[in-house]
Image (cartoon, rainbow, N blue to C red):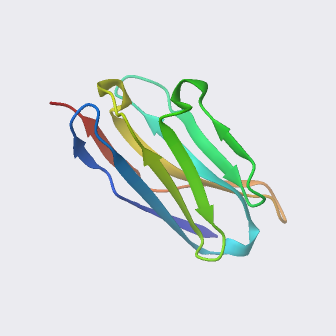
Amino acid sequence: QVQLVESGGGLVQPGGSLRLSCAASGSIFSIYVMGWYRQAPGKQRELVATITSGGVINYLDSLKGRFTISRDNAKNTVTLQMNSLKPEDTAVYYCYGRTVVPDIVDYWGQGTQVTVSS
C-alpha cells in the first residue's frame, strides 16, 4: 500500500506561481511513476505531468514551459512548480503514484485545490 499526501494548493492571481508537493509513504520502494492530474469543475480528470523513478518526464502538451515536475527518490516526494498561472488552471490537483511490482496498482492523494483568480 502507498499513501500520498499533497500540500501547497491555494488561491493565486493570474500570472502568479504555486508549488505543489506530494509525499509518499508505505510501500514506496515499488513506486515507478509519480505525478499530477487535475480535475476542473464539470470536466474529466486529466494528466498534468508524470515522472518515472528513472527521470523520464511526460507533460500535458499545453502546459510545457509553464509547469515543471521534479522528483526526489531519496525523500519520496514529487513536486510541481506552476508558473504563469491562468484562470483555466483552476482545478483540484491530485498526486498520483503507480506501482508495478508485484502488480500494477494506481494510487491517488486526496487532492488539493488550486484557484487562479483576481
Residue located 59% across and 30% down the image? 60
Residue 106 position (above or below residue 77): above
Quadrant in the rendering for residue 107: bottom right
At 73% from the left edge and 74% from the top edge, which residue is drawn?
29
Specify the quadrant of the image occupied by residue 84. top left
Image coordinates for residue 77, horizontal then vertical, percent: 55, 67
Relative height, residue 79 to residue 36 (above, below): below
**Quadrant of the frame with the C terminus:** top left
Outermost residue to the right: 102
Give the farthest residue toward the left: 118
Q: Closest to the observer: 40 or 13?
A: 13
**Of the pair 63 and 25, the residue shown nearer to us:** 63
User: 95 left or right of 106?
Assistant: left
44 horizontally vs 35: left or right: left
In the depicted structure, whether residue 68 falls above or below residue 108? above
Picture mark count:
0
Q: Position of residue 42 (x, y in %)?
A: 37, 22
Residue placed at 21% from the left, 36% from the top? 13
- Residue 103: where, in percent of width, then height? 82, 59
At a point 56% along the width and 31% down the height, the residue shown is: 64
Q: Quadrant of the N terminus?
A: bottom right
